[in-house]
């Protein structure tokens, strides 16, 4: 039993001695890491390392000139803080140590990652801005058309003799304004070539028209069902026909007129840019 206790005690002493040795090595490495990170903490010292990486060997005076530091004591202090990262030759010139080269490589990697992150954030911000502006501009003709359609359908149900030509004309003008805003948007972000602007505006007009079809159909069906339930003689078919013709005429005028609006907007933008220059 005593032999077992003695063996256990010796193993226990060996464990603590080994742990103490390992802790000493880890502590020394930790202190070295702390010194390296402390040296890299100051921006002037990072600039010194980058200078040595670029030039190879640099004298004390040249480092002072490159860093713009006139105080010799201050420069000596910063070089002292970099003692793990730099070496001094027999001629008194400074160069990077192996640890210093590794540290510079780490700095350059961090800077590249930061640049890439900055570019990505900028591109995402630009993309988000483009999408937001496009949605806002697209909402102008869409809301104008849908508002008039809902009002006109309700008005025609209660007062079939109502003339709503001026309302459809007003909605068409607002839709043209949306096309003009889209041209400004297109010239700002994509192209300033008039022919491309006209092509893009036609696609924009077609997209607006296609997105309006579900709401126009729903409004038309609502009016038709309401008139059918009301069972007003000679009102059902004539009211629906006039409403459908108004929608069709506005759609055709919007698609056909949008290229002309784009052409005028492009010419006006070019004149204003020439006047500014």
Image (spheres, rainbow, N blue to C red):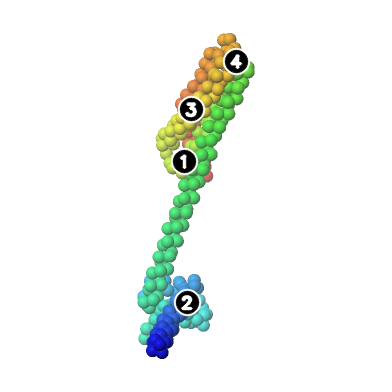
Disc 2 to disc 4, C-alpha distance = 87 Å
Report x, y in % for residue 226: 58, 19
**Which residue is pictured at 49% across the width and 28% down the height?**
214
- Which label sits in the foreground, 1 or 3? 3
Residue 80 or residue 57, whichever sits in front: 80
Report x, y in % for residue 192: 44, 40
Disc 2 to disc 3, C-alpha distance = 68 Å
Can you identify the residue that label 3 sits on?
213
**Which residue is pictured at 43% across the width and 41% down the height?**
191
Can you identify the residue that label 4 sits on?
230
**Which residue is pictured at 47% across the width and 24% down the height?**
252
**Neighbour tally class for label 3: few under 14, some 14-19, many 20 plus, Cα within 10 Å:** few
**Neighbour tally class for label 4: few under 14, some 14-19, many 20 plus, Cα within 10 Å:** few
Can you identify the residue that label 1 sits on?
187
Q: Which secondary structure lies at badge 1?
A: helix
Q: Which secondary structure lies at badge 2?
A: helix
Report x, y in % for residue 127: 47, 47
Give whichever of discs 2 and 3 has the lower sequence position.
2
Residue 34 circle label: 2
Asked if residue 27 is positioned above or below residue 264 in the image, the reply reads: below
């Amino acid at each position: 039993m005593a032999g077992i206790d003695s063996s256990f005690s010796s193993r226990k002493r060996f464990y603590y001695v080994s742990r103490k040795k390992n802790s000493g090595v880890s502590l020394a490495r930790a202190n070295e890491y702390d010194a390296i990170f402390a040296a890299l903490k100051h921006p002037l010292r990072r600039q010194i390392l980058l200078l040595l990486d670029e030039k190879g060997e640099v004298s004390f005076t040249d480092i002072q000139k490159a860093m713009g530091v006139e105080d010799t004591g201050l420069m000596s202090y910063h070089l002292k803080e970099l003692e793990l990262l730099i070496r001094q030759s027999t001629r008194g010139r400074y160069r990077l140590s192996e640890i210093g080269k590794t540290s510079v490589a780490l700095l350059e990697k961090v800077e590249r990652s930061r640049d890439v992150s900055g570019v990505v954030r900028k591109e995402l911000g630009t993309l988000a801005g483009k999408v937001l502006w496009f949605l806002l501009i697209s909402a102008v003709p869409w809301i104008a058309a849908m508002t008039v359609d809902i009002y006109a359908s309700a008005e025609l149900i209660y007062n079939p003799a109502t003339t709503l030509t001026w309302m459809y004309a007003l909605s068409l003008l607002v839709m043209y304004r949306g096309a003009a805003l889209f041209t400004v948007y297109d010239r700002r972000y994509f192209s300033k070539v008039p022919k491309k602007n006209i092509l893009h505006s036609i696609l924009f007009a077609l997209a607006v028209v296609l997105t309006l079809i579900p709401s126009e159909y729903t409004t038309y069906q609502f009016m038709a069902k309401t008139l059918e339930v009301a069972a007003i003689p000679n009102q059902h078919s004539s009211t629906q026909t006039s409403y459908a013709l108004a929608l069709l005429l506005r759609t055709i005028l919007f698609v056909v007129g949008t290229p002309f609006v784009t052409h005028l907007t492009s010419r006006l933008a070019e004149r204003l840019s020439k006047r500014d220059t």
